Image: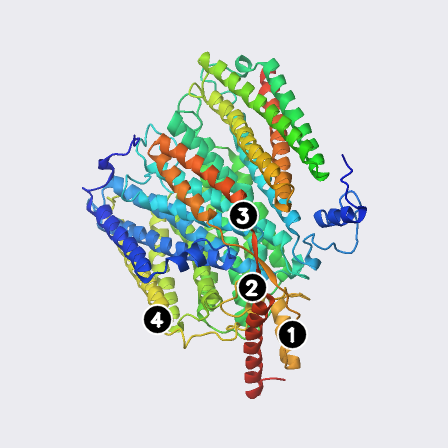
Amino acid sequence: MSDTGLPAAIEALRRVREDPHRLGHRAHGAEAPVEGAGHGATGPANKRIVVGYGFWIFLLSDIVMFSCFFAAFAVQRDATAGGPGPRDIVELPRVALETGALLLSSYTCGLSFAATNARNKLWTQIFLLITGLLGLAFVGLELQEFISLASRGITPQRSGFLTSFFGLVGLHGLHVTVAGMWLATMMAQVQLKGFRREIIHRLICFNLFWHALDIVWIGIFTIVYLMGSGA
Amino acid sequence: MFGKLRWSAIPIDQPIPLITSVVVILVVLGVLGLVTAKGWWPYVWREWITSVDHKRIGIMYCALGVLMLVRGFADAIMMRTQQAVAINAAGYLPPEHYNQVFSAHGTIMIFFGAMPLVIGFMNFLTPLQLGVRDVAFPTLNSVSFWLTASGALLVNVSLFVGEFARTGWLPYPPLSEATYSPGVGVDYYLWAVQIAGIGTLMTGINFVTTVLKMRCPGMSYLRMPMFCWTTLSASLIIVAVFPILTATLAMLSLDRVFGWHYFTNAAGGNPMMFMNLIWAWGHPEVYILVLPAFGIFSEIFPTFSGKPLFGYRSMVAATLFICVVSMMVWLHHFFTMGAGPAVNTFFGIASSVIAVGTGVKIYNWIFTMYGGRVRLTVPMLWSLGFIFTFVIGGMTGVLLAVPPADFLVHNSMFLVAHFHNVIVGGVVFALFAGLDYWFPKAFGFRLHEGWGKAAFWFAFFGFWITFAPLYVLGMQGMTRRLQHINIEEWRPMLYVSAFGVAVLAVGVVCQIVMLVVSIIKRDELRDVTGDPWDGRSLEWATPSPAPFFNFAVLPNVEGEEAYWGIKLRAIETQQLSPEPKYEPIEMPVNSSVGFYTAFFASVTGFALIWHIWWLAGLGLAAAFAGFVVFAWRDVHEFHVPVEEVARIDRARRAAREAFLARLAQQGALP
């Protein structure tokens, strides 16, 4: 997969253009400033650095938003108003399945970008598709959980605890759903437009987003489900 | 079909909103008609609505902000006059209307007056001062602006369709919950602020990236003008706290629409959680406003003192100190919550300590003037007025930071006087100073000095006559937000305050006259050199108004005060640096995606306010479709041919050479 069939020189040029920091290819430390990296001495950064950097900042803000919902959950964890508590709503087998699907999807998402780096459209699409299907499985399992809870009368209207539970888990589910729509759009773009510069930038951002959702899920899995089942 | 929307939502029976609505609608229709009749639509669409030029977007932000300041000021006049006539009487505003007026006043002034103006300055100036051609994400920038405009539209629609919130500028639950506020007022607040807030968040992301990754060659961190540092700090705070606002408003919306229990006072809801969350955003928010204001003063004092900024590095340190500590003081907004002495002490000390950073800045500005050749221009008058006003506002703030003292004047008119003292004296004075200072860079001619000075003096004295009595009233025990007053002893001070607002109104009129007179006399006031004030940072290296690509060739910065160095060299050698080799320039193409997004954001927001679910779904679907279409476009940039670049830059050089020749004629050259 690493053989792109391009002459080595073109390949080397491409790598420098796309990754002026030469991450993993040079030692850290005091060196001559790198063109296009956006350091003061060399002028504005190139588009790839700017897009990735901006998206990281967005991810930070998104994680701050999640932290509010985590905080609300921490505050209202015991505010059950005489209704069901954490132990009554956690079904670990289903959550294990959800977690497995999401973690695996992060792995396939990484593989898709490895294929993108090798400019291999077929494998990029295959791995993106698997990622999307695993995400769909995750959202489906979560919906099933919500429906089964609702059928037992466990709804956000019941208590402060359930409000913060459905709010936090639901916000993550909403993020995965929106990411899935983004993924479908990206697959169409890769198919019809190929690996243009801006398409690759968007794929970088999509990868970052998908992995970030995974990290947030680790927090939810631990704080809501694992700690809830033991409470 | 139309959710909760009924014909009765239009206030036919209430003369004040009805007349205002009719006048506003007639003015809007008049403007639209004029643009249509004159055939200006293609120009407006091409050069403004779809523009992704940071200067155009900055100017539109400022125009929106100024318009909303006037709108918010109308509310202020109503409040002060109501309190002056409603002493042992009913006054002319019924309670439910008065409550909407003070809620709308705060919401509009902060979210749609001050914020757009501050962000407008960030937009207009930061790329120019950093010596680059645009922000990191120009199209996103346009989306940000139009979302803010969409929020402003929704707030103003509430005037004639339905009602606005009666819950203050921050809708505290449980009052703002559906049980106690069943109308659409709080929903108007929630969705207007939510939409504008998302726009602001994207601005923050954009400007963190711009300052950190888009600087011209040689512009290292410690060579950036102070305003860029404050832009960076304010943007960092935006990124850190605006998501909290989004989350909090979303939670309150879930409570209201679906009957959830985040902040209710039943079934385990927790109203104090709202106070903590909203102020964890709300306090840093005031620093988002005031840090760029400090940045504006840090540009004005050196220019009009003819000296570099005193203590540049300590200024940078103080700015970053405020940036961090601003997020550790929020609890001082509710010392009376009952969190206990340890917690109150921590936040009391943090709130006092943050004044140290501000104190460093005040001394730096004073020392910048010391020994300099101070020119008392209009921007400088506002700046001096700021130092006087802000220091007093800051000291009353330190008083309020002491929990036992706060328990006494908490929620009183003393507090109202304090925060107007810092926000008007700090932020609004800075904005007027900045408007006067950078107006020539935006439009190519200066503002009329006489009317500008008149506006300053009326505003300065008007401010003090309005708010000094409120300190006294607060100490006498008058709480804020009173619709009528039954304590006779407060009458004199309320009259003085009402007189003060009249003086302020004269100041507002002077500002409007200044603008009109300046436009009429624009040829006399023309700025031909691009450097009307003897400036020191890179925006003055461009002609006025700056060309859409800002710099024909990116400047190469060799020290602090980049443009001052270039100017000194030109004057010493009596010539400009040799003509550079011009190259074609790539600029981003116009995009209607911002306008499109805002259109559907307004429709969706309106639908959500009135529970018109099908329309909300349709709006969201259309927004997604719009993004896909936008993502499909193939042309992102256009080339400015080298001849065009050379032609524009040679005109600039000719103006500068004429300026040098003029200096030589006057015998001013060394």
* Residue of label 2: B550
Q: Earlier in the sequence, mark 4 or mark 2?
A: 4
Q: Earlier in the sequence, mark 1 or mark 2?
A: 2
Mark 4: few/some/many CA within 10 Å (<14, 14-19, 20+): some
**Side of B494 where A120 appears, left or right:** right
Label 3 or label 1, whichever lies nearer to me, is 1
User: Which residue is at a point 39% across and 72% down the rendered structure image?
Assistant: B448
Residue B527 badge: none
Residues tagged 1 and 4 counted as in contact (Cβ below 8 A) = no
The Cα atoms of the two marked residues, 1 and 4, are separated by 38 Å
Q: Is residue B176 visible?
A: no
**Side of B203 where B432 appears, left or right:** left
* Residue of label 3: B204
Residue B517 badge: 4
**Which subunit holds the residue at mark 3?**
B
Residue B579 badge: 1
Task: Determine the secondary structure under disc 2.
Answer: loop
Mark 2: few/some/many CA within 10 Å (<14, 14-19, 20+): many
Task: Determine the secondary structure under disc 4.
Answer: helix
Q: Is residue A105 visible?
A: yes
User: Which residue is at a point 48% across and 16% down the rendered structure image?
Assistant: A147
In the picture shown, does residue A128 fall above or below B37?
Answer: above
Residues tagged 3 and 2 counted as in contact (Cβ below 8 A) = no
Residue A118 locus on image (x, y percent): 73, 38
